Amino acid sequence: MPKVWDDFNEIDSNLDSEGRKNGTINIQSVPVKKKWIRKAIPFIACIVVSALIGGIAGGAYTNYLVSKDKNYDTPITISQSGSSNQAYQAAYTPPSSLIAKIASDTGPSVVGVDTELVSQGFFGQKQVAQGSGSGIIFDKRGYIVTNQHVIDGGQKIYVTLPGKQKLTAQLVGQDKISDIAVLKVDRDNLPVAKFGDSSKVRVGDLAIAIGNPLGEEYAGTVTSGIISALNRTIDIDEGEYSRRYKLIQTDAAINPGNSGGALINENGEVIGINSIKFADSEIEGMGFAIPINDVKTIVDQLLKNGYVSRPYLGVSVVTITEKMASQYKCPAGVGVYTVQRGSAAEAAGLKPNDVILEIDGVKLSTNEELINELQKHKVGDSVKLKIWRDGSNLTISITLGEDKGSTN
């Protein structure tokens, strides 16, 4: 059996170097201690393979389907490594009249979102934890989109309309992987934001952020800047699961409470949903937003099903580099870390320590390549995996299951 590999720092350095080349920000790596593949690979490499469809679907992945973390718009600090794709910083002062018009036209569709979590204290006393964020009205019948982490764990959800009218909101659906949730309030003929096309956004374009920084007291705050970068890749490790996002970067101020608010272009169209979740505590002028095209894809499924359906393999995996392969006498590819009980992978006979070499004839070198290929399929599709096991190559057929998304 190969020896335990202790030099995690060297691999972490290699991963960070590769991440910078690809414009990826890597966050935290933790070594694991199980069998030879598990001993050798930093935890940052592990993911649960769930094909993520459409928009965010193309840019997010998760280690585990359900996180028990309760996050009330608390920023997760990202590392400073990584370079942006098409990064650009320049002084730009748009006409104040333009910003004022956009704020006047779109501002009424941006609302406050508050949550309450009631628990019992040690001596039986009632304790109430509160959280706040923002949301965007996208349907006049009372439908609102926000970040999932804003309402995560909330037993009661409230929406505050412009004018301070506070309404109880119902949760229509939520998706942890994409960090999107849809709410509904019992009101009609509400002002609606116009969604734009985030694929047409350019670096250097005007960016206007509207939200509720620091809660209701500062509701409807407007800040402006430019689009600093596109397709900024950020990896987030929250212990129980990891995710990858491709985001819009802006220098418009996005502060706690802004999560779920609108990032707007010069035409008054929403091009992204702001999120303080991707904040960097050591860098000012670096805000992030989920592209609105990704949001629309997720919202459509939440409205239809209450969850986001994704083709599902049911394994957590690690990338095995050429260097690792040489050291552990196995081929490079995608190593199987764990197989979830009751999953499609288990039914097909996939086992921990297998190395996935190909999917439907396409050679694999990294976790991301496996995810990208799975994204091309639908629930119920059959795929063929070429794997290495104990010195032999095997071919396994797997019928993809359904991942209904993380909703708890």
Image (spheres, helix red, strand yellow):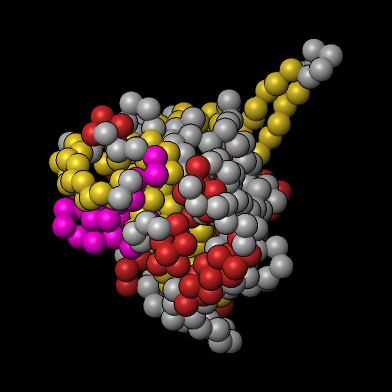
- Residue 360 located within the stretch drawn in magenta: yes
Residue 244, image x and y in percent?
A: 45, 56
Residue 124, image x and y in percent?
A: 80, 12
Q: Is residue 207 above or below residue 262?
A: below
| Residue found at x 58% / y 27% | 156
Residue 84 in view (yes/no) = no
Front one among 86 and 125? 86
Residue 17 in view (yes/no) = yes
Q: Is residue 373 left or right of residue 187?
A: left
| Residue found at x 16% / y 53% | 360
Front one among 352 and 264? 352
Total residue callouts: 0
Q: Is residue 264 left or right of residue 357?
A: right
Residue 344, image x and y in percent?
A: 27, 33
In this picture, which residue range is highlighted in magenta? 352-377
Q: Is residue 342 above or below residue 143?
A: above
Q: Is residue 398 above or below residue 47?
A: above
Q: Is residue 297 left or right of residue 103?
A: left
- Residue 212 located within the stretch drawn in magenta: no
| Residue found at x 68% / y 70% | 283
Check the image and name the residue furthest to the front. Answer: 1
Front one among 158 and 82? 82
Check the image and name the residue furthest to the top. Answer: 124
Dividing the picture into quadrants, the one containing residue 180 is top left
Check the image and name the residue furthest to the bottom. Answer: 91
Residue 85, image x and y in percent?
A: 44, 77
| Residue found at x 27% / y 34% | 349
